[in-house]
Amino acid sequence: MTRELYIGLMSGTSLDGIDAVLVAFTEQKTQLLDSHFLAYPAALRAQILALQQPTENELEKTALIGNALANLYALAVDQLLAKAQISADQIIAIGCHGQTIRHQPGFKDGIGFSLQIGNAALLTELSDISVVSDFRSRDIAAGGQGAPLVPVFHQAVFTHPQLSRAIINIGGIANITYLGRSAGSAEAASAHTKNCVDGFDTGPGNMLLDAWIKHHLNLDYDANGDWASTGVSLPALLTSLLDEPYFALAPPKSTGRDLFNANWLQQKLAKNAAAHPQDVAHTLVDLTVQTIYSALINHCGELDEVYLCGGGARNQLLVKKLQALLGKVRCHNTDRLGIGADWLEAVAFAWLAKQCMDKKTANLAQVTGAQGARILGAIYQH
């Protein structure tokens, strides 16, 4: 049985660091062999965060930060290979999502753009491995959102013929993949119905929560939701947060820091300036939970199972609240499906790299809104 080895690299909206995975593909199986996390230095994280909004001399800053990221990606790859005792020449390619700094599909000219930095050419030079990157641009050129990209991977590895499933990634931004019972069929792949496959961004996941606790306690995240648990939800503030028009949009849709950022939150807090920080944190948890649940009810079909991944899957307060809304439909982490909740997105980009190298399409038009199936990614050949 032929086994092909790929590496997946993911650095998401949370800006915590790089998830690196070694993945083996056979005709029957996708197997996570090893994983490694490399945290961003605080200074680099601050520089990337500053690029989320227009800034002075941003072209130069973007290029230089892209080079710095390529060096970190290469270090993560080296550390992963050393950990797994695998040599670079055994790897077919690296799938590198890059770091998103702007995401505005449809902006102004109707096409818009999505920009991920990380200098894939430099990563190829540093790693001596072919790199596949720039996965979103082709889908956007075809009229799509360019995101989310992982539903097609979820369809390939998590579809169940008798069970309808939702895979919910709660990273900086939260997104849902809905897999109906017929999600593995060719008919379902080409038809937009509630009994096949769908996917979209629901809104903020951990992004606002992380920024809020960083501002008040200088912590990167609220472990287990412990800090938010000491507060109470503020109904008036939650109503104001939920008034954001994005939440009422029908899929296809995607979002990011271009919309949900510190300025957005401060505007919503204008009438709640005296609120206790813990109460705001608790309300932000409710925002994430309510928007996920509303999206499941309004845009997905019947559900048998829900699986969580991303950092939010470790937030016990968030998971407890979501489970309460879901009732008899149980929430589990994707660990139960064979791929750890912390590594699922990185594995997806290894899979997307393989699709590109194999010249196979890797988007779902009903998910992104593109005009049709496209081969995604740009290859920097070693």
Image (cartoon, rainbow, N blue to C red):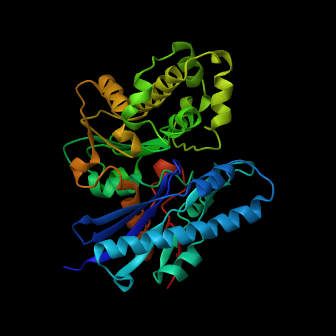
Residue 364: x %, y % from top left: 45, 55
| Left or right of 116 in this view: 231 | left
Residue 242 in view, yes or no: yes
Query: Which residue sits furthest front?
Result: 217
Does the image show residue 160? no
Q: Classify residue 318 as left or right of residue 161.
A: right
User: Would you identify the image quadrant in which residue 264 lies?
Assistant: top right
Numbered marks: total:
0
- Which percent across, then down, holds residue 353? 43, 70
Q: Is residue 305 above or below residue 156?
A: above
Q: Nearer the viewer, residue 216 or 152?
A: 216
Residue pictured at 31% horizontal, 79% vertical: 86
Q: Nearer the viewer, residue 138 or 58?
A: 58
Residue shown at the point (64%, 24%) measured from the top left: 268
Position of 149 relative to 300 (above/below): below
Q: Quadrant of the N terminus?
A: bottom left
User: On the picture, is 261 further left or further right than 289?
Assistant: right
Give the x, y percent position of residue 10: 46, 59
Q: 298 or 33, which is in the foreground?
A: 33
User: Percent position (x, y) of residue 191?
Assistant: 40, 48
Q: Is residue 90 above or below residue 67?
A: below
Farthest residue, direction right: 56
**Pick the front one: 83 or 136:** 83
